[in-house]
Image (cartoon, grey):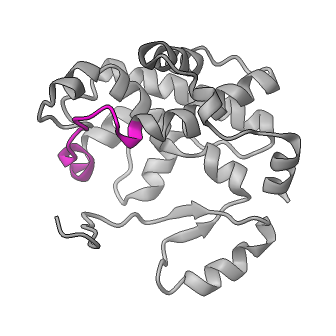
Amino acid sequence: SQTGFCRLTKIKNSVATATIPSCNIHRFLSDVGDIFPFLVSGQNVIETSINNTNPILHAPITLFNLSRIENGEDYSFYGTAASRCILDYAAKADRERIDIAQASGAKGESALDILNGFWTDQYDNLYDAIKNNATYVAGKGPTSLQYRYITEDIPYGIAPLVYLSKQLGVHAPRLSALLEMYNLLFDRDFMQDGPKLTEDSLHAATE
């Protein structure tokens, strides 16, 4: 609990990273490779941003466990809070995310493939990949609504995906429903809180 310290429970095998402009990635990895050997080259920041499992997993699990959070309960976020039904919803929302990635010209990678890339053990479905990971199951869930699963993952994760789905004409009912429920529950427009995806910003991100 000391300030300035970080407790690492496990180190992932590989994490995709990118730079702006994207051509600087090799120089970046050369500079930090000895410190962070698990970093691997991604195509660009659009690809690494869309292929982020956090919003896809955090948003539905958090939404369907809001009463636990408000009550300040002691619970396992990926254990008791992540039921089979909720993770099935997440897996289907993840399929929508992949469709959005492909429509944007980025390589879409499933949450299951990303998780299998993080760790040594490999699984055939998202439920098993999470439930058989002791590091995930041991993690406690939030006990405050002022938590990054909401304040970060919704405006900077789910909202941009929904925005891109509309711009690219991709059907994304589950992602759209997640955003709408958070908007209604918190009486705010998370889309307005997130990044403004202009044509110039998207071009700069893919250079």
Query: Looking at the image, which is closer to me, 115 or 67?
Result: 67
Residue 140 picture quarter: top left
The structure residue drawn at horizontal position 38% and vertical position 50%, both measured from the top left corner, is 122
Magenta stretch in the rendered image:
133-149
Q: Which image quarter holds the C terminus?
A: bottom right
Q: Is residue 103 left or right of residue 83?
A: right
Give percent across and percent down for residue 82. 28, 29
Q: Residue at x 50, y 87 (%)?
A: 34
- Up the image or down, 22 lies above or below 62; here it is below
Residue 27, how many percent across, how many down? 71, 82
Using the rendered image of the protein, determine whether residue 87 is visible from the camera's viewpoint: no
Residue closest to the eye, 124 or 102: 102
State which quadrant residue 169 falls in.
Answer: top right
Q: Residue furthest front?
A: 187
Q: Is residue 189 left or right of residue 64?
A: right
Residue 19: which quarter of the image?
bottom right
Instruction: Give the side of residue 108 with respect to residue 110, left or right.
Output: right
Q: Is residue 188 left or right of residue 125?
A: right
Q: Which residue is situated farthest in the left direction here?
A: 74
> Magenta stretch: residue 121 in it?
no
Residue 168 lies, in percent from the top left, at: 81, 26
State the quadrant of the N terminus: bottom left
Between residue 105 and residue 139, name the one nearer to us. Answer: 139
What residue lies at 81% left-to-right and 48% top-to-bottom? Answer: 201
Residue 134 in magenta stretch: yes
Q: Is residue 145 visible?
A: yes
